Image (tube, helix red, strand yellow):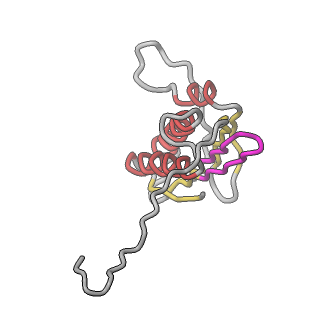
Amino acid sequence: MNQRFSATRRGARLARLLAAHQLTAWGYPHGTEGHDTVVLVVAELAANAALHGRVPGRDFALSLAHDPDRGVVRIEVSDTHPALPARLAPAPDQAGGRGLLLVEALAVDWGVRDRLGPGKTVWAECAVSVRYPVQCEVVAPHRQTQGTEP
């Protein structure tokens, strides 16, 4: 799954919602092992792209890939800002600055790489182990028999 978003708070929120939807489609519904971890990591990386990686007039991109054999979901968030993300040690009373610390704690692995064109891609791999069957309701088509009303 690949999608571009505006480098805004709204774009970051939409990236998180799309990731949650995609995970459910892959068999990892809300509240299951892996789902909430992946959604939180997507939220942090998308927020960083919108807040710190923002270049006026440019979007950020989210890519999700599921590798069921390895039991991981790979998250990639690309932006066009050239600065690499900084892992900070925020003061205890500081409101922000913990995003990459959360990513590091939750992901199996993570890193940063150059991308084609300006900017960089921050990636993370999160463990997802138990898949649940995707529930979908099958609705039979309505058929009217002759001489009866619906």
* Displayed quadrant of residue 137: bottom left
Q: Residue at x 62, y 24 (%)?
A: 105
Is residue 67 rendered magenta in the image?
Answer: yes
Answer with left or right where residue 106 lies relative to residue 14: right
Residue 17 drawn in magenta: no
Which residue is at the far right? Answer: 69
Indicate the position of residue 130 as horizontal and vertical percent values.
64, 37
Q: Residue furthest bottom?
A: 146
The answer to whether any part of residue 52 appears in the image is: no
The magenta region covers: 63-77
Quadrant position of the N terminus in the picture = bottom right
User: Residue 88 occupies which quadrant of the picture?
Assistant: top right
The percent position of residue 101, horizontal first and vertical second, equals 58, 25
* Foreground pick, 80 / 126: 126
Vertical comparison of 106 with 58: above or below: above
Residue that sits furthest to the left in the current view: 149
For residue 67, say whether it is visible: yes
Residue sitting at 55 percent across and 38 percent down? 35
Along the line of sight, which residue is nearer the eye, 31 or 65?
Answer: 31
Q: Main secondary structure of the magenta part?
A: strand
Q: Position of residue 135 (x, y in %)?
A: 51, 51
Of the 4 image quadrants, the one containing the C terminus is bottom left
Point out residue 132 in the picture as x, y percentages from the top left corner.
Answer: 59, 43
